Structures are given as C-alpha cells and as structure tokens.
Amino acid sequence: MASTASWYCPGCGQVAEAAGACPKCVGGAQGVRLLRVSAQDLLGRQIGDYRILTKLGGGAFGTVYRAAHATTGTIVAIKLLAHPIEHADSQRVVIEARAASKIAHPNCVEVFDLQQTSDRRPYIVMDLLEGVTLSKVMRQRLSVAEAITLISDVLLGVGAAHRQGVVHRDLKPGNIFVENGKAVIVDFGFAKLISDPKAPNVSITGEVVGTPAYMAPEQITAGRELDGRADLYALGCVLYEMLSNRLPFSGKSALQMMSAHLKTVALPVTAYRPDCPKQVSDAIAKAMAKNPDDRFADAESMRRALMLSTGMPRWIYVVLAALAAALVIGVARACG
Ligand SMILES: Nc1ncnc2c1ncn2[C@@H]1O[C@H](COP(=O)(O)OP(=O)(O)OP(=O)(O)O)[C@@H](O)[C@H]1O
Ligand SMILES: [Mg+2]
C-alpha cells in the first residue's frame, strides 16, 4: 500500500512522478490525463491484488473505491473499512464476515473476496454495480406496484441469506442498488466486521451498528440474539419511506429515533399515501411490529403478503406459469 507517487491515471490506476497523459490509456487525442494525488490518498495505490482507480463514495464505516485487478484488469468495487479490527481474534472475525458476505443470489451483490490490509483494515472486493442506490430512486414518486416489486426483489435476497443463517442488520435505501430495474443488496456480512461480539450493536469505534432510522427495537436494546425478523422490520421501514416519502419515525437525534422505534407506533402509510391499498399498509405495519413474534415469520411470507395485497400477482403468477409450461412443452417438442 505504500507509495509516494503524486500522479495517477483514473483509467488504469497507473502511477507516475510527473503530470501529463497516461502512456497506457487512450481517451481522445490527448490520452487520459493524469490526476494529482496527495500522499495520504489511496488513489493509484495498490491494495492486495487491486489498484485503486476512483472513489465511489463513503459511509459511516468505510470508503468504496472503483479498482482494477493488477494482472487481469477486471474492474471491481472495493469497500475499505476505516478502522482496523481490534479484536484479538481478528482472523476469525474476517473468516465469519467472509462467509456471511458470500450469499450466491441474484439479488445480493457478488462478493469476490474479503481480506485485510497490512494494518488490519478489512476490505471487501465485490462486483461493481452500475445502477443507483434506492435512496436516489426514491427521490421520484414510485407507484405502489413499483415499490413492491423492488422490495420483493430485496426479500428474495434476504430470504436466501436468512436460510443460510445470515442477518444483514443494516438494510436501508443506501445499501440497496437498483440495476436494470432489479434490486441488489450490498454490505452483507459488513456488520460482522464492525461489531464487537460482546456488544453486538456497538461498533469497535463506539458507534451503533445499523442505521437508527431503520433499526428494529430488539437491535436497539441488544438484549436478545437477532434473527432475520430484524431485517424484515428494516424493510418495513424502507417500504414505508418509499411510499410515503418520509421516515416512519422522525427524530432530531439518533437517540430520539431509537426511542420512537421502541415506543411509538407509526401512522399507517395510507395517512400519507391514500392510493396505497389497506392490505399493503397493514403488511408494512406487521413487518414493523415491535415484537418480532408479531411480524412475518420469514421473508417469503412478507413477500407473498405484499404481492397478494396489490391484487396483481395472481394473474401474473398464472401468466408466468403458462409461459413456463409453454416453454417446457416447446423445448420438449424441439428435442423430439
Ligand atoms: N458494489 C458497489 N458498486 C458500486 N458502487 C458501490 C458499491 N457499493 C457501494 N457503492 C457506492 O459507495 C457508496 C458508499 O457506500 P458505503 O456502504 O460505504 O456507504 P453507505 O451505504 O452510505 O453507509 P454504510 O457505511 O452505513 O453502509 C454508496 O452509496 C454507493 O454509491
Ligand atoms: Mg453501504
């Protein structure tokens, strides 16, 4: 990771001692111009097998970069944690998080690797998503059907994770990408890296793991082991926000918001979105029940309830089933 280079190419990550065009990249008549990089900056540096190209964004616990594999040139996204793992057993923490992040499912981002830098800062190498986060998508008014279709995708992804015993713990619009109309979840396994096993919801830096606006009551009190129903609660909050354009609980501070999750019942979403069917509003309220036992038992039950509540799925299922049957018959005939 150590380098003193002060110029780098955002196209291939090549570093140089002087300004000018990158000798390797061709982009217009002048080639790709090298950019200045400060000594502290990671741009142009190498982390493991990857050269850092550009910064994509940063969250509470780390920074996400676009990077290229040094030999194959494969472009990936790398999320680098801001702090080293301070547990004595950091290797075990990384191994657990690695397992948690590898949920092969079309609605979960593909994770290629999870490693540590020489100063024990973990980093996740994952598929570079071309879409935008749900936070951005939500700035436009979504129809009820559009919102449910996206949440249904997310529920398919979390359902697969839950069946493998993995709880996301930080589902929120910023951790859901929308790519070609399909929702993809990022940051699975990340909570494992930033939480102390003895205090599951408090990070090594003393910050709360999870985002107060979407945190299930049991996640706040940390009095009980979390299961997948904490993720269903968060998705209830996300869907509430997608439809009403506001968070279920507003609070000036994280503490106020967390207190509302524990004690206040949100107004039904229909109060803000009159065209929302009551069954959808009821399903959201059920997902957001204070007691996990009063929520949906699993992601698939919540998904089915939402799909059925819009009134459209029965015929969609019928049409899809008919198409699948026609395809099978067609293939069978073609094969003689
Ligand atoms: N796999 C990815 N492909 C492309 N861009 C990504 C990918 N993962 C994250 N990003 C981008 O990086 C930004 C920062 O992500 P990051 O997870 O660090 O922050 P966050 O989700 O806002 O907060 P948190 O740290 O709580 O998860 C995202 O908003 C997104 O724009
Ligand atoms: Mg994130």
Image (spheres, grey):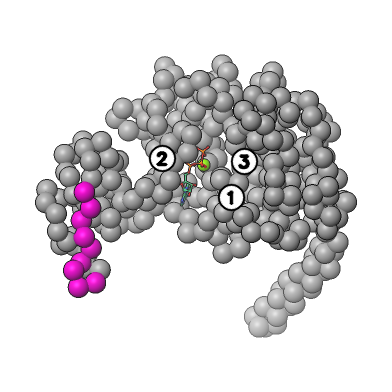
Mark 2 residue element: strand
Magenta segment main secondary structure: loop
Q: Which of marks 3 and 1 is nearer the N terminus?
A: 1
| The quadrant where residue 221 appears | top right
Q: Position of residue 75 (x, y in %)?
A: 36, 55
Q: Can residue 19 be seen?
A: yes
Q: In this view, does 191 lie to the left or right of 322?
A: left
Other-residue count near label 3 (Cα within 10 Å), few / some / many at <14 / 14–19 / ≥20: many
Q: Is mark 1 within 8 Å of ligand 1?
A: yes
Q: Is mark 3 on a helix, strand or loop?
A: loop
Query: Identity of the amino acid at label 2?
Result: Thr
- Mark 2 vs mark 1, CA separation in Å: 18 Å
Rendered-image quadrant of the N terminus:
top left
Question: Which span is picked out in magenta?
Answer: 28-36
Q: Which residue is drawn at 56% across and 64% down?
A: 180
Image quadrant in which you'd find residue 233: top right
Rendering coords of residue 29 (x, y %): 20, 73
In the rendered image of this protein, does residue 290 appear above or below residue 74? above
Q: Can you say whether 112 is above or below 34 in the image?
A: above
Query: Horizontal and vertical percent for residue 280?
Result: 83, 51
Q: Residue at x 59, y 22 (%)?
A: 200
Foreground mark, 3 or 1, reads 1
Mark identifier at residue 300: none
- Label 1: state its secondary structure: helix
Q: Nearer the viewer, residue 247 or 220?
A: 247
Pointer 3: what residue?
A: 171
- What residue does disc 1 label? 135
Q: Which of marks 3 and 2 is nearer the N terminus?
A: 2
Say whether mark 2 is within 8 Å of ligand 1: yes
50 vs 92, left or right, is: left
